């Protein structure tokens, strides 16, 4: 059965109510916003969202009422500060109360790596002495069985689905991605299913021309969605600049629940799909966001 | 911009220039969000040309970014990097003890350099991000934050990122490998850590700021260095680099 499908089909099939979904795994770049918007449009509820620094994606999903539990190191708006929806949910239960499992970037990455390696935990030296140890039941003080040193054990984090946005993939989901990788590689291996959202679906020969760049092998992938500008407003090396104005606009609107709902209608609920979203952004705005300063990589050879 | 008089920098320009001067040439530096991004760019452009920056998203960079950044994941921080790896690669190097200096922000700091970015009372803050990791594991770290009484607390409301705990040799007893906070840089002055007690000691005040101003905005009884000095103002070259990497003044405007 083919994996190539629309975002609506991918979300409907692989992100059910109550799913644990890892997103935003590259940190501030390549955030799968198109997938996030579709999750909201489909009215998904009770999700666990997993990611180190989601920038405004998790704040948005929380504000839209999709989330029951957040497993993250940081939730806010990287350029502009606090996440207003995240605050309202934690402090006032608006639009609903949420649970927060506080990690550091390193413990979150190690939790995913543990799942990716098939072990129940991994040890680390971070978080010793931090109140996070008492606040997060999945971080526990431990002792090295060889040296007796104090350590922290990080319990494995296994997403039901990891959603990534990448530059290109073939129809089987073999994915080329480049730029900062964050925890994308670990999260893709840790998950039961992977949705690859990409700028371009390419011929398998293009993928096989540079196998070192294939950081997600297709046999791990359940769905492949061709979604140009799928990471907007986050940047994507080679394709898109960061749309700072979008983050500022979101930050200002989300200060109040009423204005956030206006924003949500305009940019998510009233548009049917990514194409309509791009139309609403407008050609001139998109043109200014095209990464058009050339920075080609020298070709490599796999001569044999 | 370039016509800004060199003698009237904003307090945040003084802060970021002071932070940049903490970066020594040849050091491996772990660069956090916002002001630290600018501090690294200044150091690279001026006095620390061979410093190497590690960014938690996986970027390893030995030149200033190609254009101003809002986040470390912006394409001008990727293009021309030495390497683009993953979070575990760079944090693994940090955990090994290979990082000389970490640069951080915070919502609250206390007398012993502990940091809070998780919650204050009922107010939920964004969380650790990489802050706890950098504070726990870098050989030394410095913190930049606005100097307000609600931020400079006797004890942090939540200890997200370890400084010296309750003081003394707490880090060693806790098993923390990194050296802890070296400097706390605010918009009023600079604190250094007393090597024995772990307490923050005021070592410089910015021009025009008095010790009383610092005391008024600090929730504990501030220890002042007997050799208290004035923080050097950023020079024209530093201001020019700040103007280049913070074009809209979002990071360093008043």
Image (tube, grey):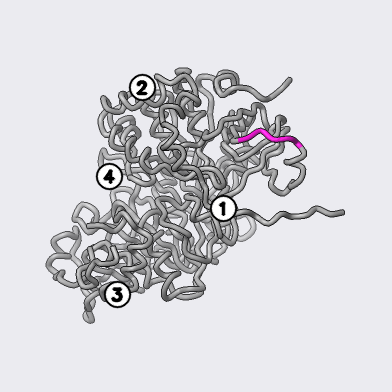
Give the extent of the magenta segment. A200-204
Tell me the element at label 4: strand
**In the visual, does A49 lie left or right of B119?**
right
Do tags 3 and 2 sit on the same chain?
Answer: no
Position of residue B131 measured from the top left corner of the image (x, y, whole percent): 42, 53
Q: Is residue B80 above or below residue A284?
A: below
State the residue in front, A244 or A260: A244
Chain containing the residue with disc 3: B
Q: Which mark is residue B120?
A: 4
**Residue labelled with disc 2:** A265
**Residue labelled with disc 1:** A294
Tell me the element at label 3: loop
Do tags 3 and 4 sit on the same chain?
Answer: yes
Q: Residue at x 26, y 71 (%)?
A: B201
Residue extending farthest front: A284
Do tags 2 and 4 sit on the same chain?
Answer: no
Chain containing the residue with disc 2: A
Do tags 1 and 3 sit on the same chain?
Answer: no
Tell me the element at label 1: loop
Q: CA distance from mark 2 to mark 4?
A: 32 Å
Q: Identify the image quadrant of the C terminus of chain B.
A: bottom left
Q: CA distance from mark 3 to mark 2?
A: 49 Å
């Amino acid at each position: 059965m083919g994996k190539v499908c629309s975002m609506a089909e991918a979300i409907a099939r692989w992100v059910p109510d109550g799913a644990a979904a890892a997103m935003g795994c590259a940190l501030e770049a390549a955030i799968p916003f198109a997938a996030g918007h579709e999750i909201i449009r489909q009215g998904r509820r009770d999700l666990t969202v997993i990611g180190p620094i989601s920038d405004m994606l998790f704040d948005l999903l929380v504000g839209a009422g999709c989330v029951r539990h957040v497993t993250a190191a940081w939730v806010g708006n990287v350029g502009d500060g606090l996440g207003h929806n995240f605050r309202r949910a934690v402090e006032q239960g608006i639009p609903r109360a949420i649970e927060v499992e506080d990690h550091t970037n390193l413990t979150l990455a190690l939790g995913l790596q543990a799942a990716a390696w098939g072990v129940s935990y991994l040890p680390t030296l971070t978080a010793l002495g931090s109140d996070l140890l008492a606040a997060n039941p999945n971080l526990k003080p431990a002792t090295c069985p060889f040296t007796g040193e104090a350590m922290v054990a990080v319990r494995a984090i296994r997403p039901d689905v990891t959603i990534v946005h990448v530059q290109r993939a073939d129809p089987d989901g073999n994915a080329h991605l480049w730029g900062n990788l964050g925890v994308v590689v670990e999260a893709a291996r840790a998950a039961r299913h992977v949705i690859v959202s990409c700028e371009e679906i390419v011929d398998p020969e293009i993928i096989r021309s540079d196998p070192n760049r294939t950081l997600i092998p297709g046999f791990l992938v359940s769905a492949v969605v061709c979604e140009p500008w799928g990471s907007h407003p986050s940047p994507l090396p080679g394709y898109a600049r960061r749309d700072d104005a979008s983050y500022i606009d979101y930050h200002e609107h989300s200060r109040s629940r009423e204005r956030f709902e206006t924003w949500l209608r305009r940019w998510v609920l009233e548009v049917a799909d990514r194409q309509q979203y791009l139309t609403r952004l407008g050609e001139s705005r998109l043109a200014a966001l095209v990464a058009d300063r050339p920075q080609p990589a020298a070709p490599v050879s796999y001569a044999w | 911009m370039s016509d800004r008089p060199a003698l009237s920098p904003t307090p945040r320009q003084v802060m970021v220039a002071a932070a940049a001067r903490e970066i020594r040439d040849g050091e491996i530096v772990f660069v956090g969000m916002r002001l630290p991004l600018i501090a690294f760019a200044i150091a690279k452009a001026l006095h620390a040309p061979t410093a190497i920056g590690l960014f938690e998203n996986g970027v390893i960079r030995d030149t200033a970014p190609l254009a101003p950044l809002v986040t470390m994941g912006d394409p001008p921080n990727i293009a021309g990097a030495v390497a683009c790896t993953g979070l575990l690669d760079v944090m693994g190097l940090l955990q090994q003890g290979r990082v000389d200096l970490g640069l951080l922000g915070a919502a609250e700091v206390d007398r012993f350099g502990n940091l809070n970015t998780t919650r204050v009372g009922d107010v939920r803050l964004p969380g650790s991000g990489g802050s706890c990791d950098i504070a726990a594991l870098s050989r030394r770290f410095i913190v930049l934050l606005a100097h307000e009484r609600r931020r400079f607390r006797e004890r942090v409301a939540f200890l997200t990122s370890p400084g010296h705990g309750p003081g003394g040799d707490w880090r060693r007893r806790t098993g923390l490998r990194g050296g802890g906070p070296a400097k706390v840089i605010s918009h009023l002055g600079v604190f250094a850590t007393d090597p024995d007690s772990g307490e923050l000691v005021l070592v410089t005040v910015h021009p025009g700021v008095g010790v009383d101003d610092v005391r008024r905005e600090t929730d504990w009884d501030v220890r002042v260095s007997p050799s208290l000095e004035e923080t050097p103002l950023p020079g024209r070259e530093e201001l020019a680099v700040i103007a280049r990497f913070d074009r809209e003044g979002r990071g360093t405007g008043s």
